[in-house]
Image (cartoon, rainbow, N blue to C red):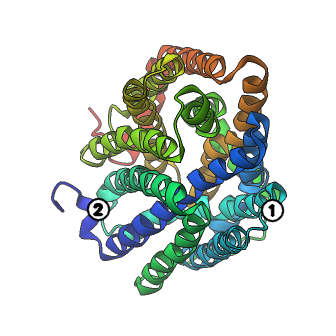
Amino acid sequence: MIKALPALRSRNYRLFFAGQGISLTGSWMTQLATIWLVYNLTQSPLMLGVVGFTSQILNFVFGPFGGVFVDRFSRHRTLICTQILAMIQSLLLAVLALTGVIQVWHIIVLSLFQGLINAVDAPARQAFVPELVEKREDLASAIAINSTMFNGARLIGPAIGGLLIASFGPAYCFLIDGLSYIAVIFALLAMRIRPIKIPKSKVNPLQSIKEGFVYAFSFAPIRSILLLSALVSLFGMQYTVLVPIFAEEILKGSAETLGFLMAASGVGALFGGVYLATRQKVVGIGKLIAFSPTILGIGLIAFSFSRFLPFSLATMLFVGLGTILQVVSSNTFLQTIVDDDKRGRVMSLFTMSFLGTIPFGNLLGGVLATHIGAPNTLVIDGIVCILGSIYFTTQLPNLRELVRTVYEEKGILVRS
């Protein structure tokens, strides 16, 4: 297994893998429980969009500052702090739900708090990965394993969450999530991290943010990846807040149905993650980035027309597959070519482009679903993803030539 997944040769990465695997399962349970609870409290597609918006908007607003922070301070210590704060947030949700006093505004406030945590946690987590692997050539494997772990949790978490909600209510999902953070905190504390000398910067944080933007957007391949990721997130991820409508109203199911639908997307994503984790080279990854939004778009359109649960589950496989191929391929590409001293800022921009645009997509999806229905909304989303994929494909030959020079400088390609 270690030969097939070379990143697991590194002790620190194995600890990270184990802790995150447990914690992420709890996180997916909380996500499922939150959207189910909101829809049952309000019966409003718009409120699903509003809560989805609040959960990520601060990630978008403060993401660039999070990137600057990550480039200036220990990523290891930063992650310990963010995991403790995230644990507190989940346990507060659990207490409110267990005591029966929880209201939508409680969920909104705590979602805002989680978004603020994520503004630092997400770039720190991604920039920390290169510090965990002992050999640089194992980096692509580590990034892909991260996504496989994320989507293994995405498979297990909603399935368990759906059963828990149906049997005991959503409060126990929040409680288990809160307790699961203990695993990742212990894993982080057990790591032996080599001290990295971080040069003290006298540059104004706003100037640092500007430098990161200029660095990223002046290089066409990075700029194109960020813009495509933003498009896919804005439209392609709206399904995550609209799925309860399909589960309850269109497919006439329950919380278990919602859990199975989310788990099905996790299965598709897991297949994609396993493929990427065993992929030996980063060369040729542009084709995956270009084609994956088409897979996602086709899956969304097919899901929107389905009124038969087995077919809906099958279409969600493609939704999960297309999503993970796009996100992880883009992440791997960026981690491979960026300069180390700008890694945190570039990954914060990637976080903004992917996670940061989701709240606007959630809000847009909630508004559209209120006026034209959830199925028609997903049809539009699927078409936009396919068009974005086609446009990126037309730009690929020019982008490939620009990347070739960087690959040669970093020794990924041998000069011919």
* 319 relative position to 3: left or right: right
Asked which quadrant contains residue 1, the reply is: bottom left
Would you place residue 318 above or below residue 190 in this image?
Answer: above
Q: Earlier in the sequence, mark 1 or mark 2?
A: 2
Measuring 24% from the left and 68% from the top, which residue is drawn there? 9
* 315 relative position to 379: left or right: left
Asked which quadrant contains residue 115, the reply is: bottom right
* 270 relative position to 180: left or right: left
Would you place residue 184 above or below residue 124 in this image?
Answer: below
What residue is disc 1 on? 106
Q: Secondary structure at mark 2?
A: helix
Q: Position of residue 266 (x, y in %)?
A: 41, 44
Measuring 47% from the left and 18% from the top, which residue is drawn there? 302
Q: Which mark is residue 182?
A: none
Would you place residue 150 above or below residue 179 in this image?
Answer: above
Would you place residue 264 above or below residue 24 in this image?
Answer: above
Q: Residues within 10 Å of mark 1 (few under 14, many from 20)?
A: some
Looking at the rendered structure, the kind of residue marked 2 is: Ala
Mark 1–mark 2 distance (CA, rounded to whole Å) = 40 Å
Mark 1 or 2: the one toward you: 1
What residue is disc 2 on? 7
Q: Using the image as rendered, state which of residue 6 and residue 106 is in the foreground.
A: 106
Q: How many marks?
A: 2
Looking at the rendered structure, the kind of residue marked 1 is: His
Measuring 48% from the left and 19% from the top, which residue is drawn there? 306
